[in-house]
């Protein structure tokens, strides 16, 4: 027929976005759900103890479940499940083994006081920096409505943005449109879409005739970003340049000259960009990738630039959610937790070293046009391993890379591998971060038992960033006996196969590293003394206090202690981990609609709740409603209902007298009412009574 068919991409250089179901953000399960008997936990009032398990107890005719925590010596504490919002898993920097707190002494109070003094200083510094930035004058970029080309660029994005990505883009644009310098951190795993956020910010700056510099830690990353920017911006009159040692002296000189005359719009490079001979005509935006990987001198130069221009920093080191919330009003942060659409969980295999398995894994990847990482973390034996693999799989093209090579030689190896000249890269853990090769979708880790959990997770994260199924193989020596810790580590990495699982399990070390990046590693001693979560909470309170805001109360609701059997029976929820997870979620509810949603979820998952579960849900609802009305505690003592109100609330004596005459007593914010004055349906009558007997002070 002589008929040729062209797609819109080939004709116009853009493609229509594929509509797909958006993935839900991966949110970390509550820490306690991962705590096993023997693990360390922190109670806000009582300190650091060891979790022993869930225990059901009968007390004064009432049956409930408690968390049993072992403290120093023979001390034991039974924590009611409605107080699980006060208990968190103990997390420290490094592998610190904490000393157990001794109950009935002031040592825990003293430890907390020291940390409070420390976080006050940090909060003061953060607020001072924040207020200085708020007061300084910067360039206000034009709103999107005045930049039609920006919409064209966004429409040409071939993927469906994730909700987190959209939020990050909107937050960055909003910052850029303000008349003060932006200083925003975008945090998200490799491949979660940070580059697109940076690219749109860069184009927004260029459309207002401002130059953009993108600073990255390695030459290969610079090249990868350069190629991405060139490809995405090819339909627009934007000049993107690369300042790299792979360019000749003459080429570099020409780029620098054009940059100074404003002929270059976006320049991408390593720390070479911070040298004195790099001069801009009109720099408006600096994008920094993985700032923590730059030296002190470079960081000082960046600090100076921050007060003058908009700065967007990106990191793949996860920032703990608790820390993110603590700094929400003093450090502008956007967190991308949603995996991209069509991303598949990585299939993980843990086996003894097996040559037939290695050959099969390499050939399967090569046969589908992909590439393989083979990680061997001993430089001394890496050439021997390379020769062994070459004999085992003669069909494959191998290349070796490790940290003891000359820097330019290593970069050449990486560039050649990323451009597809080799099938298998045999390397040490230098590939652990900062490398984005979507065509490499199989990783084999030799002697995996000798790696840390965070290392294993990050190594596995090098693959699985395309839409293809990725594979990871963690091999251990069949002659070596694994220690219990090594076995546990490999088991955890095997189980953590879901997308974003690292935020929940394997990223513990990285999260603490992320905290150190933001607050400074010198805070580690203070973090270790009370555990990371409580440290972050105390920091949040210090920030709120210095801003003149009322610090949020420790508990999500009022304390409720009433004689009702209230627990989750084994017949209703048999799995211990799931049960602890639900207890903690219930303890953290703070609004009536959340209680409704939880009730519906439990009905859906486990069926109609038996009486102890109905009572538990009723108590949670009362706890939430009472807190909203100004009550601190509700209990039954000596056949009297005892209701304690907050200092900002006054008991309504007239309403109490009308209902109970002189039988209701009020003294110093405590209301006492005899139980006999309520009928058999006393619990519902109490709920109905609460809104009528208090007024605001």
Image: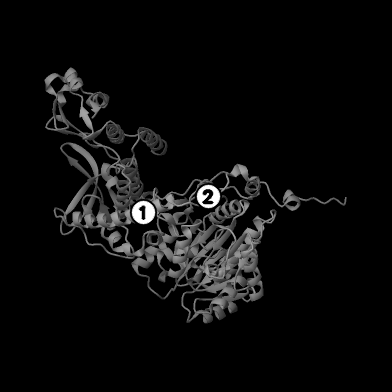
Judging depth in this view, the residue of 19 and 293 nearest the camera is: 293
**Which mark is first along the chain, 2 or 1?**
1
Disc on res. 128? 1
Residue 79 image offset from top left, x and y in percent? 23, 46
Side of 148 where 614 appears, left or right: left
Instruction: Note whether 195 is above or below 63 in the view shown.
Output: below
Left or right, residue 460 beside residue 552: right
* Snapshot quadrant of residue 553: top left
Question: How busy is the neighbourhood of tag 1: few (under 14 within 10 Å), some, or many (20 plus)?
Answer: few
Q: CA distance from mark 1 to mark 2?
A: 21 Å
Q: In the image, what residue occupies the spot 42% across and 36% down?
A: 604
Name the secondary structure under disc 2: helix
Q: Position of residue 57 (x, y in %)?
A: 20, 43
Looking at the image, how many numbered discs can be counted on the residues?
A: 2
Q: Nearer the viewer, residue 387 or 260?
A: 260
Q: Can you see residue 419? A: no
Please say whether residue 292 is visible from this viewpoint: yes
The residue at 39%/48% (across/down) is: 329
560 lies above or below 71 = above
Task: Please give the residue where the numbered disc 2 appears in the rendered image.
Answer: 176
Expressed as whole percent of the image width and height from the top left, the position of residue 217 reads 51, 67
Name the residue furthest right: 1
Residue beneath the point at 39% across and 55% down: 129
Q: Which element is circle 1 on?
A: helix
Mark 2 crowdedness (10 Å alpha carbons): few <14, some 14-19, many ≥20:
many
Quadrant in which residue 671 is drawn: top left
């Amino acid at each position: 027929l002589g008929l040729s068919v062209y797609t819109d991409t080939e004709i116009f250089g853009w493609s229509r976005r594929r509509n797909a179901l958006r993935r839900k953000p991966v949110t970390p399960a509550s820490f306690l759900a991962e705590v096993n008997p023997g693990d360390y936990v922190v109670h806000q009032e009582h300190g650091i103890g060891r979790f022993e398990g869930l225990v059901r107890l009968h007390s004064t005719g009432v049956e409930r479940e408690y968390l049993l925590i072992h403290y120093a010596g023979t001390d034991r504490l039974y924590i009611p499940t409605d107080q699980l919002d006060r208990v968190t898993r103990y997390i420290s920097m490094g592998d610190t083994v904490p000393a157990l707190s001794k109950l009935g002494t002031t040592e825990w109070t003293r430890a907390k006081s020291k940390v409070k003094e420390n976080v006050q200083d940090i909060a003061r510094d953060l607020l001072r920096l924040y207020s200085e930035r708020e007061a300084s004058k910067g360039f206000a970029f034009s709103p999107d409505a005045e930049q039609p080309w920006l919409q064209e660029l966004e429409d040409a994005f071939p993927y469906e943005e994730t909700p987190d990505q959209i939020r990050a883009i909107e937050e960055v644009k909003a910052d850029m449109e303000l008349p003060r310098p932006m200083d925003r951190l975008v945090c998200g795993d490799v491949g979660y879409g940070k580059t697109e956020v940076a690219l749109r910010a860069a184009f927004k700056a260029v459309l207002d005739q401002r130059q953009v510099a993108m600073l990255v830690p390695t030459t290969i990353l610079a090249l990868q970003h350069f190629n991405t920017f060139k490809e995405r911006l090819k339909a627009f009159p934007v000049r993107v340049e690369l300042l790299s040692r792979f360019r000749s002296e003459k080429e570099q000189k020409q780029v620098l000259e054009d940059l100074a005359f404003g002929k270059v719009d976006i320049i991408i490079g390593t720390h070479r960009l911070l040298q004195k001979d790099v001069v801009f005509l009109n720099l408006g935006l600096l994008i920094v990738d993985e700032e923590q990987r730059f030296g002190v001198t470079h960081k000082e130069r960046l600090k100076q630039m921050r007060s003058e221009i908009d700065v967007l920093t990106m990191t793949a080191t996860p920032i703990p959610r608790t820390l993110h919330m603590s700094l929400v009003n003093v450090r502008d942060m956007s967190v991308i937790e949603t995996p991209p659409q069509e991303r598949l969980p990585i299939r993980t295999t843990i086996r003894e070293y097996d040559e037939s398995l290695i050959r099969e894994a390499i050939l399967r990847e090569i046969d589908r046009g992909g590439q393989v990482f083979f990680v061997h973390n001993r430089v001394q034996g890496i050439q021997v391993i390379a020769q062994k693999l070459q004999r085992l799989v003669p069909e494959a093209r191998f290349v070796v890379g490790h940290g003891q090579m000359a820097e330019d030689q290593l970069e050449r190896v990486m560039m050649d591998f990323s451009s597809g000249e080799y099938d298998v890269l045999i390397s040490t853990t230098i590939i652990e971060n900062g490398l984005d090769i979507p065509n490499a979708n199989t990783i084999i880790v030799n002697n995996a038992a000798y790696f840390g959990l965070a290392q294993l997770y990050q190594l596995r994260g090098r693959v699985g960033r395309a839409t293809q199924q990725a594979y990871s193989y963690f091999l251990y020596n069949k002659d070596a006996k694994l220690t219990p810790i090594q076995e546990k580590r490999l088991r955890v990495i095997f189980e953590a196969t879901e997308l974003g699982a690292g935020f929940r399990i394997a990223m513990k070390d990285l999260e603490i590293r992320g905290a150190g990046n933001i607050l400074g590693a010198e805070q580690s001693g203070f973090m270790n003394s009370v555990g990371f979560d409580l440290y972050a909470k105390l920091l949040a309170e210090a920030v709120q206090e210095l801003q003149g805001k009322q610090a949020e109360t420790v508990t999500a609701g009022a304390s409720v202690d009433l004689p009702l059997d209230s627990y989750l029976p084994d017949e209703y929820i048999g799995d211990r981990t799931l049960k602890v997870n639900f207890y903690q979620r219930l303890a953290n509810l703070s609004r009536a609609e959340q209680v409704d949603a939880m009730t519906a979820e439990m009905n859906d998952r486990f069926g109609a709740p038996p009486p102890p579960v109905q009572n538990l849900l009723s108590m949670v609802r009362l706890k939430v409603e009472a807190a909203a009305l100004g009550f601190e505690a509700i209990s039954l003592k000596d056949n009297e209902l005892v209701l304690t109100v907050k200092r900002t609330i006054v008991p309504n004596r007239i309403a109490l007298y009308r209902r109970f005459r002189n039988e209701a007593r009020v003294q110093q914010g405590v209301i006492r009412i005899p139980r006999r004055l309520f009928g058999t349906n006393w619990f519902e009558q109490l709920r109905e009574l609460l809104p009528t007997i208090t007024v605001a002070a």
